Amino acid sequence: MANTEVAHDFSPFIRIYKDGRIERLIGNDIVPPSLDPKTKVESKDAVYSPENGLSCRLYMPKNTNHDKKLPLLVYFHGGGFCVETAFSPTYHNYLNTLVSAANIVAVSVDYRRGPEHALPIAYDDSWTALKWVASHSNGKGNEDWLNNHADLQQVFFAGDSAGANIAHNMGIRIGKEKLEGGLNVTGIVLVHPYFWGTEPVGTETRELATRSFVEGLWRLVCPTTSGCDDPLLNPVLDPNFASLGCNKVLVCVAEKDMLCQRGKFYCDNLGKCGWGGVVEIMEAKEEGHVFHLFTPTCEDAVTMLKRVVSFVNQD
C-alpha cells in the first residue's frame, strides 16, 4: 500500500510522498499531432535524442509557399521544470495558433523534468534539441520540414515561465559556443519568465512564505544550486549576461504575476549591461501568470499574440 505521507507539497504543481512517489497535479494530458482544422496548421513528432527517447513536436502551416523558407521558432514549454510537456493540449493549441498567425515553422521541445531528472538535465536536453535543429542547416538533416521549409538563418527562441528561463539560458549558451552547422538566432521571446533572486526587487513580494515556496521549488528541481542567486535563476548576476546570443529580446510580463517585477528587472539590466541588442517589454494589466494559455481568446491574450507575431516578422 502506498505511503500517503507527504514529504514536499508544491501544490498546485507537484507533490512528493515520503515513499518517493511523485504526483503531478497538472499538465498530465497529452494530445497527438494533427492537422488542426481551425488554424490549418499541421504537426508531427520527431525524435531528437534517440539515446534518451526524447521527441519534439514540429508545426508548419499547411498552405505554406514551398518556394520560400519560413522563420523558425524553437519553443520551450513552462511548468516549473516539473510539470507539463510539449504534447499537452495547452501547448499544442497555443503553438497551432502562433504558427498560423506568424506564418512560421516551429519546434516545440520536450525535455526531461525534475525532480526525477534534476537540472541541468532540462538545459542539456534543450541544447541537444538545438544541436539536432542545427544539423539541418545544410539541408541534409533527417527531418524534411526543417530541411525544406525552415530558414535557419532566421531563428527565434521562445518560452513561458520555466520555458522562458530555458530560452534565456540557451541564448547565453549560444552566445558563448557555436552550434555545429550553425543557427542564426535573431531574437528571443520571454513570456512571464521564471527568474528570481534572494533579495526582492521593485515591488516584488516580501512575504516569507511565498519566497520560501519559490526557493523550495527551485531547490527541488535543481538540488545542486547555490540558491536563488544562481545565475541560472537570477541571470542579472551571470558574468556572461552581456553575451546573450541574439539581436533583440521581447519580455512579456503580467501585472498580477508574482514574477512581474523580476521580468522588468531583467529588462532594465539587459539594456545597460553592455549587450549590443534591443530589448522590449510588454505588460498586461490586471492579468496573472501565463493567463494567455488559460484564456487564449481574451483581449489581452490576443494583443500579446499580435505583439509576438510582430516581433518575429519585423525586419
Image: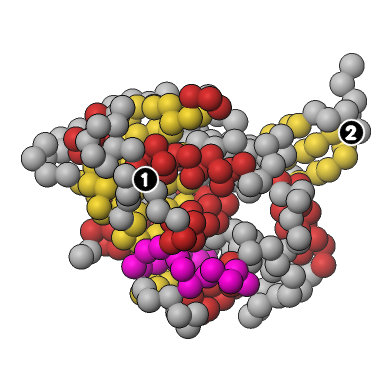
Q: Residue lying farthest bottom? A: 272
Please state which of the two labelled residues, at mark 2 or mark 1, is closer to the viewer.
1
Give the CA separation, mark 2 to mark 1: 44 Å
Query: Residue type at mark 2?
Result: Lys
Q: Is residue 273 depicted above or below 39 in this figure?
A: below
Give the residue drawn at x 15%, y 35%: 63
The answer to whether residue 242 is above or below residue 160 is below
Q: Position of residue 211 (x, y in %)?
A: 76, 64
Colour scheme:
secondary structure
In what element is the residue under mark 1? loop
Quadrant of the rendered structure where residue 118 is?
A: top right
- For numbered disc 2, what is the local secondary structure? loop
Residue 119 point in image, percent of width and height = 66, 46
- Residue 36 placement, left or right of 282: left
Q: Does 10 sit above or below residue 211?
A: above
Range covered by the magenta-colored residues: 237-254
| Location of the N terminus (image quadrant) | top right
Instruction: State the image coordinates of residue 77 (x, y, percent, origin top left).
Output: 50, 45
Disc ID at residue 180: 1
Callout 1 amino acid:
Glu
Residue 91, label in figure = none
Is 252 magenta? The answer is yes
**Residue ID at (23%, 39%):** 138
Mark 1, other Cα within 10 Å: few <14 / some 14–19 / many ≥20: few
User: Counting other residues with Cα less than 10 Å from the Cα at mark 2, is it few (<14), some (14-19), or many (20 or more)?
Assistant: some
